[in-house]
Image (cartoon, rainbow, N blue to C red):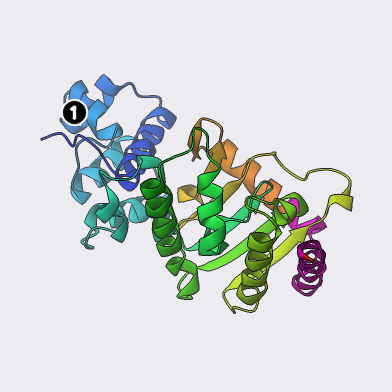
Amino acid sequence: MARPNPTLRQRRLGAELRRMREQAGFGGSQLGRAVGMNPAQVTQMESGKIGISVERLRTIASACMCVNQPLIDALADIITEREKPGWWEEYRGTLATDFLEVAELEGHARRLSTYTITFVPGLLQASVYASAVFSQAFPPPPRHEVDLRTAFRIQRQRVVRSGGTSYSAFIHEAALRMQFSGPKVLTEQLDALLEDSEHPGISIRAVPFDIGSLPGPSENFTYAEGPIPELDVAQMDTGHGSQLYDSPAHLASFREILTRTASVALSEDESRDFIRSIKKEMESKRG
């Protein structure tokens, strides 16, 4: 029976199987004949709407002449996962799918890196700041929706605060100065950043205005490392919602952006001093 709403991981498995087929130069009908599937089944498999066994995966890999054993093993691990549904599933039906997929992406990542230019990254937002960010959406969401989104965002932060997933955040000065509800809220957020910067699993580095130019795109993005580089995923916030990127070319581009950002960002100690200086300015504005 076809899944009506395959998860992010299920769709990624299907995408990798499609990429494997295309690299072998096969059409869907050709692959189907080689492994005993009809074209409709191949299409559903590649969209994540039907699952396959590990045995079928290895048959497909052999037919497609794939010799990337680490990739095959990593895909087999996705198939054989017997974990309970992620905590984010509790919110299915009450929050938009984009919110759930970001949490799913973070929940399965081996390491996370973010670059933000318009606001402090969600994984480091204080509750009062997150609420202010959501309240500024257009059109403005109702109060109960703001509260729901805020609670979900705070719950997402457990993935890095637990120490289980290392996290690097590059935050542009524009984001450090952006006020969503006045200097008091920003001051509280900067305080929270300073506290998080001392966490052993969290690295916070500021990107000041005076570096001369942006090292990457003007959108905020997250780079999630998988068990192997081929299964990394980049997620970008855009004006049209969340966008996911997993092609080799896109992933290489995002890795280069992170490398360039790391080369111009302040060190962790310098960043703490920089954040303190901005916080002092905000406190003076509060009088």
Q: Residue at x 20, y 33 (%)?
A: 35
Q: Which residue is mark 1?
A: 41
- Give amino acid for label 1: Gln
Dominant SS of magenta comes to helix
Name the residue at the front extreme.
Answer: 287
Name the residue at the left extreme.
Answer: 1
Across and down, in percent, residue 124 comes to 56, 63
Q: Residues within 10 Å of mark 1 (few under 14, many from 20)?
A: some
Q: Nearer the viewer, residue 51 or 206?
A: 206
Q: Residue at x 50, y 47 (%)?
A: 134
Across and down, in percent, residue 204 comes to 67, 66
- Residue 34 magenta-drawn? no
- Residue 273 magenta-drawn? yes
Q: Is residue 69 visible?
A: no
Name above or below for residue 245 compared with residue 154: above
Name above or below for residue 283 compared with residue 2: below
Q: Is residue 246 left or right of residue 178?
A: left
Q: Is residue 132 left or right of residue 39?
A: right
Q: Which residues are magenta?
A: 260-286
Q: Residue at x 29, y 60 (%)?
A: 87
Q: Nearer the viewer, residue 70 or 44?
A: 44
Residue 273 placement: quadrant: bottom right
Element class at badge 1: helix
Across and down, in percent, residue 1 comes to 10, 35
Across and down, in percent, residue 209 comes to 84, 50
